[in-house]
Image (tube, grey):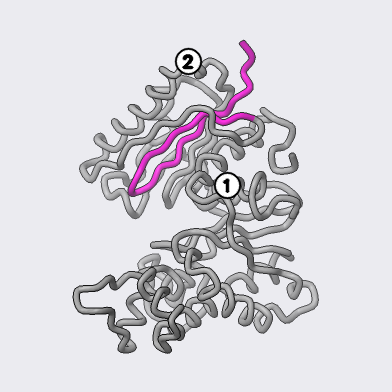
C-alpha cells in the first residue's frame, strides 16, 4: 500500500480535530472531540482518541507524515506547546506525547495561524502568491508568512505572529508583556470592549460580542462603526509594517472577526492604502480567507508534506 496521505491534527481551546488528507487537499477521514476543560492529561487523552479514531478508519497505513497545528505559543524546536486557551498545558511535550500514540511518523509542529497560512497558500486565497501574510483575527490575532513561495514558520513555528507587533507605543499593556499590540486593538474581545467603553449598548440582555458590534455597525451605529474602524486601522498598520519589512503582495484575513465582511474590510483597505505608502509596500492587498474551519487541518497536512517532501511542493501545486 502506498504512503500518499498526510495525517493532521488541529488543536484549539474549543475542539481537537484530526484528518487524513490527500495530495489535493481533500479530507478523506475526519475525527473530532471537544477540548476538555480539565487538566493537561484530559486534553492529551482527547488527542489520543482522535488519533485512534483516525487509525481505526482503515487508511492510516497510507499516512506518510503527521502535521500538528496547535494554539500557541508553540516551540517547534523543543516540541512543546503552551496554549493560552488550554491552561493545563504549559511547556507540554506535545510532540513526544503524540508519538507515543501515533508512532514515529515524521511529524511537523506549527502554530495554528501558521497552519492557516499553509492552507490558504496551498488551496485558498493566497494560492498563486509567493509573498503573503495570512492572519487569524478572532479571540486573539495570529499570523503566518509565505515568502518566496514557501511557508516560513521560523525556528519555533511562530514566525509571522503579527498580533504582537506594537502599533501604539503608548497603548494598553498586552498580556504578552508589550503594549499597544495589534491584538489589543483588533481582536474580537478588544473590539467589543472598546465599543462598550465608548457607549455602545446592545438590546437589554443582548449579545455583547464582536459579532453583535458588527451587526450594529452594519445598521450604521456610529460607535460600532468607529470600533471596527479602530480595529481595521491597527490591522492595516501591522500589515503595512510586515509588507515594508519583507515585501508582501497579499494579506489574507480569516477568523471570526473577518466574518464581519465589509464592516471590517472597507476601512481596512482604506487604512492600508494610507499606511503602506512606500512604492514596494503599496501593492499589498487585504482579502478574506476562503477555507474556513478546515484551514487548520489542511494547513497542518500541507506544512508536514512540505517539510518532509511528501508531495510535489504543496505550496506550489
Task: Residue 107: tell me if it is visible.
Answer: no
Q: Which residue appears at 30% of the width and 88% of the height?
A: 199
Quarter of the image with the C terminus is top right
> Residue 7, labelled with which disc?
none
Is the stretch drawn in magenta largely helix, strand or loop?
A: strand
Residue 15 shown in magenta = yes
312 lies left or right of 30: right
Q: Nearer the viewer, residue 89 or 306?
A: 306
Residue span colored magenta: 1-22
| Of marks 1 and 2, the one in the foreground | 2
Marks 1/2 in contact by CB < 8 Å: the verdict is no
Q: Which residue appears at 48% of the width and 32% of the height?
A: 19
Q: Nearer the viewer, residue 208 or 251?
A: 208
Q: Quadrant of residue 212?
A: bottom left
Rendered position, 282 above or below 222:
above
227 lies left or right of 153: left
State the residue lying farthest toward the top: 1
Label 2 CA crowd tier, 10 Å (few <14, some 14–19, many 20+): few
Residue 218 shown in magenta = no
> Residue 58, labelled with which disc?
2
234 lies left or right of 194: right
Q: Which residue appears at 40% of the width and 42% of the height?
A: 11
Location of residue 254 in the rendering, given as x and y in whole percent from the top left corner:
53, 59
Label 1 CA crowd tier, 10 Å (few <14, some 14–19, many 20+): few
Q: Nearer the viewer, residue 304 or 200?
A: 200
Q: CA–CA distance between discs 1 and 2?
A: 35 Å
State the residue lying farthest toward the front: 219
Element type where label 1 sits in the image: loop
Q: Which residue is mark 1?
A: 155
Rendered position, 290 above or below 123:
below
Amino acid at each position: 500500500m502506498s504512503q500518499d496521505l498526510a495525517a493532521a491534527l488541529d488543536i484549539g481551546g474549543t475542539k481537537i480535530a484530526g484528518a487524513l488528507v490527500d495530495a489535493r487537499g481533500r479530507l478523506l477521514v475526519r475525527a473530532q472531540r471537544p477540548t476538555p476543560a480539565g487538566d493537561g492529561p484530559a486534553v492529551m487523552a482527547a488527542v489520543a482518541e482522535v488519533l485512534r479514531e483516525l487509525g481505526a478508519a482503515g487508511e492510516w497505513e497510507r499516512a506518510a507524515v503527521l502535521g500538528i497545528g496547535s494554539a500557541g505559543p508553540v516551540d517547534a524546536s523543543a516540541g512543546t506547546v503552551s496554549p493560552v486557551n488550554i491552561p493545563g498545558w504549559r511547556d507540554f511535550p506535545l510532540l513526544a506525547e503524540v508519538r507515543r500514540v501515533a508512532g514515529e511518523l515524521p511529524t511537523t509542529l506549527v502554530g495554528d495561524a501558521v497552519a492557516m497560512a499553509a492552507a490558504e497558500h496551498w488551496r485558498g486565497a493566497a494560492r498563486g502568491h509567493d509573498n503573503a501574510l495570512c492572519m487569524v483575527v478572532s479571540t486573539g490575532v495570529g499570523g503566518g508568512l509565505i515568502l518566496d513561495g514557501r511557508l516560513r514558520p521560523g525556528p519555533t513555528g511562530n514566525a509571522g505572529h503579527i498580533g504582537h507587533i506594537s502599533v501604539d507605543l503608548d497603548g494598553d499593556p498586552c498580556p504578552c508583556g508589550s503594549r499597544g499590540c495589534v491584538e489589543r486593538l483588533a481582536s474580537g474581545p478588544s473590539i467589543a470592549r472598546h465599543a462598550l467603553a465608548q457607549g455602545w449598548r446592545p438590546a437589554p440582555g443582548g449579545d455583547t460580542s464582536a459579532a453583535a458590534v458588527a451587526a450594529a455597525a452594519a445598521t450604521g451605529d456610529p460607535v460600532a462603526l468607529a470600533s471596527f474602524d479602530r480595529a481595521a486601522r491597527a490591522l492595516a498598520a501591522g500589515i503595512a509594517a510586515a509588507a515594508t519589512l519583507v515585501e508582501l503582495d497579499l494579506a489574507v484575513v480569516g477568523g471570526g472577526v473577518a466574518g464581519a465582511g465589509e464592516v471590517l474590510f472597507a476601512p481596512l483597505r482604506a487604512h492600508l492604502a494610507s499606511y503602506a505608502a512606500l512604492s514596494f509596500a503599496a501593492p499589498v492587498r487585504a482579502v478574506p480567507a476562503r477555507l474556513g474551519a478546515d484551514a487548520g487541518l489542511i494547513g497542518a497536512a500541507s506544512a508536514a508534506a512540505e517539510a518532509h517532501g511528501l508531495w510535489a511542493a504543496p505550496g506550489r501545486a
